Image (tube, rainbow, N blue to C red):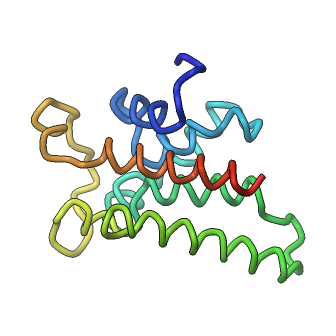
Amino acid sequence: MHESLSKEEKARQLFLAGYNCAQAVFLAFSKELELDEQTALKLSAGFGGGMGRLREVCGAVSGMFMVLGLKYASADPTDQKAKAQLYARIQQLAKRFKEENGSIICRELLALPPGPQDPTPQARTQAYYQVRPCPEKVASAAALLEKYLQENP
């Protein structure tokens, strides 16, 4: 993938190449986090479809949260201040995503009924892309995260 692309465009292209929402966002930032591509893909694989097609938290949002964890979390489980700071960052980005997209919940973003769906992913066809806002949600998450990281080095 061309290195001059914005994170927004990288994430969109990754999604359009077949990666799930979480993978697309997380992988767009993996190089800066010094995380190899295979680990990034495997780590984020289960978060697609609102966590394994449960249609809960949007995979793009989960991808943002994983990046925040790698960037800002403490390895010390007793560091309550660091936990609180990370959670505040997560809440701030979740709020920005919700303001821009209307929700952080996959089923709400896709206008689906409550509950999990068949675990089998749908084929990525032209018809799929015409009814799914996922490329835009992935791009939105990556753009918001890139801006946040620039503001909070």
Image vertical order of residue 88 relative to residue 10, above or below: below
Whether residue 45 is visible, yes or no, is no
Task: Name the residue at the front extreme.
Answer: 151
Q: Tell me which corner region of the image, top left, top right, bottom left or bottom right, holds residue 72.
A: bottom right
Kindly identify the residue that appears in the image at 48 percent across and 72 percent down.
95
Residue 15 position in % (x across, y down): 38, 36
User: Taking 9 as reference, is 101 left or right?
Assistant: left
Image vertical order of residue 65 relative to residue 139, above or below: below
Could you say which is closer to the camera, residue 79 or residue 42? Answer: 79
Kindly identify the residue that appears in the image at 43 percent across and 55 percent down.
59
Residue 28 position in % (x across, y down): 56, 36
Could you say which is closer to the camera, residue 36 or residue 5? Answer: 5
Kindly identify the residue that appears in the image at 32 percent across and 58 percent down.
53
User: Taking 97 as reference, is 79 left or right?
Assistant: right
Task: Name the residue at the top extreme.
Answer: 2
Image vertical order of residue 118 relative to residue 13, above or below: below
Q: Tell me which corner region of the image, top left, top right, bottom left or bottom right, holds residue 26.
A: top right
